[in-house]
Image (spheres, rainbow, N blue to C red):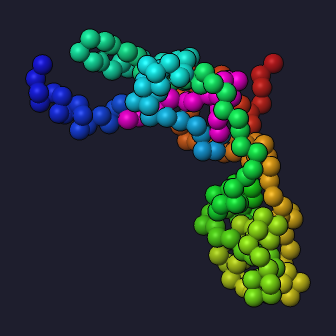
Amino acid sequence: MDGNFRTNFVREPSALRQHPALVLNADYRPLSYYPLSLWPWQDAVKAAFLDRVDIVAEYDEVVRSPNMVIRIPSVVVLKDFVQPQKRVAFTRFNLFLRDEFRCQYCGSKGDLTFDHVVPRASGGITSWQNVVAACAPCNLRKGSKSLRQCGMSLRKPPRPPSAQELLNMGRKFPPNHLHESWMDFLYWDAELQA
């Protein structure tokens, strides 16, 4: 085989880079919806060879080794059940997901930051119960004042979400690309046909 071919294949696998595998737990549910649980095709092939997953669906494309040809997996299922986390980490991303990527004062989407409902200058702490997603104009308008002082109100009271709530919330935000082989395993907020 031409050594140049191998070098080009290794350096420019752009076509193969675009073939992620949807990863399902042993109960055939995605490990997460947002972000969607995806592996690069290389990890899916490796896990299949190590007998850690079953391949449920495949792409039409193949990868080759000197003695084997394998179709690229598009859906894999873990053989061992991974227990979902019960505790939700307090992160900026999870906060925005809880608040549905909307300002909790005006409801706008877009460039968000976070705001302390009870300002830190007034003894407010950084916690699920005191921090909300806010757009820059609302955050500036509120500043270090209380809601009453600035005449603003919240769309919903802040509280810690459960892991299941965040999972369900993530289902409202499907990624831009969903491969057709994944559709039987993803349940986005779409009306079912009778």
Residue visible at 71% across and 31% down?
Answer: 187
Any part of residue 96 in sight? no
Where on the picture, by quarter, is residue 105?
bottom right
Q: Quadrant of the N terminus?
A: top left
* Position in image of residue 99 (x %, y %): 75, 59
Residue visible at 25% across and 37% down?
Answer: 12
Q: Quadrant of the C terminus?
A: top right
Where on the picture, by quarter, is residue 45?
top left
* Position in image of residue 51 (x %, y %): 50, 18
Q: Is residue 162 left or right of residue 4?
A: right
Along the line of sight, which residue is nearer the eye, 164 or 185? 164
Please tell me whether residue 182 belongs to the stretch shown in magenta. no
Q: How many marks?
A: 0
Along the line of sight, which residue is nearer the eye, 128 or 140? 128
Along the line of sight, which residue is nearer the eye, 93 or 78? 78
Any part of residue 94 in sight? yes
Residue visible at 80% across and 87% down?
Answer: 122
Q: Residue 118, relative to residue 62: is it above or below?
A: below
SS majority, magenta: loop
Q: Which residues are magenta?
A: 17-32
Please tell me whether residue 27 belongs to the stretch shown in magenta. yes
Q: Is residue 44 left or right of residue 123?
A: left
Residue visible at 65% across and 40% down?
Answer: 33
Q: Residue 56, relative to residue 43: is it above or below?
A: above
Q: Residue 111, relative to residue 29: is it above or below?
A: below
* Position in image of residue 10 (x %, y %): 24, 34
Where on the picture, by quarter, is residue 119?
bottom right
Q: Residue furthest right?
A: 148
